[in-house]
Amino acid sequence: MTKLRKLNRPTGHRMSMLRTMVSQLVKHERIETTVAKAKEVRRLADNMVQLGKDGTLCAARRAAAFVRGDDVIHKLFTELAYRYKDRAGGYTRVLRTRIRVGDAAPMAYIEFIDRENELRQSKPAVPQPAQRPPLDPWTRSQLSRSFASPKEVKSFEAED
């Protein structure tokens, strides 16, 4: 597993908390937490959606080893995998909301994008530019010569 923020918790508590938060995010599709926890949950939730899009038995076992609940796994591999089949990443959004009263911690909503009742509409996908066929080296060199600026020839005449 990649390096995560420590969040002032021992490793067992931290991993248990993040697994539960990812499971609740998949189940409810929006949760409120602190900004630091939301940034970590975003990374892990995007990885779980990617596993759901793979749809293999190996991916299902890896997801089942992390998230809690059969209903969560079913939702990952059916509903979320279908919703994000054309998206190449960035399945979650973190929206900062308020400052918590007790300890002044910055709070944030983390939610899945492209769903009903989302807090902010997602931006439309940017279309990829059309792929041009590669040119052979001879044509490419001829084109580069035709667009190059002409060289100025300096004359070495004595000017008196």
Image: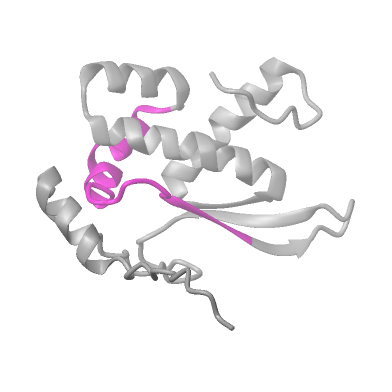
Residue 71 can be seen in this image = no
Residue at 32% in and 16% down: 61
Q: Is residue 123 above or below residue 105?
A: below
Give the residue at the far right of this rendering: 103
Q: Is residue 147 above or below residue 83?
A: below
Q: Magenta segment: does it hold 115?
A: no
- Residue 63: give x, y in percent of width and height: 38, 24
Residue 70 can be seen in this image = yes
Q: Is residue 89 above or below residue 71?
A: below
- Residue 28: give x, y in percent of width and height: 46, 49
Seen from the viewer's position, the closer of residues 92 and 67 is 92
Seen from the viewer's position, the closer of residues 147 and 106 is 147
For the record, the magenta segment spans: 69-95
Residue at 86% in and 59% down: 101
Q: Magenta segment: does it hold 80?
A: yes
Seen from the viewer's position, the closer of residues 89 and 105 is 89
Quadrant of the rendered structure where residue 102 is? bottom right
Task: Tell me if 117 is positioned left or right of 131 in this view.
Answer: right
Seen from the viewer's position, the closer of residues 42 and 67 is 42
- Residue 131: give x, y in percent of width and height: 16, 55
Quadrant of the rendered structure where residue 59 is? top left
Give the residue at the far bottom of this rendering: 160
Q: Is residue 35 above or below residue 152?
A: above
Residue at 29% in and 22% down: 60
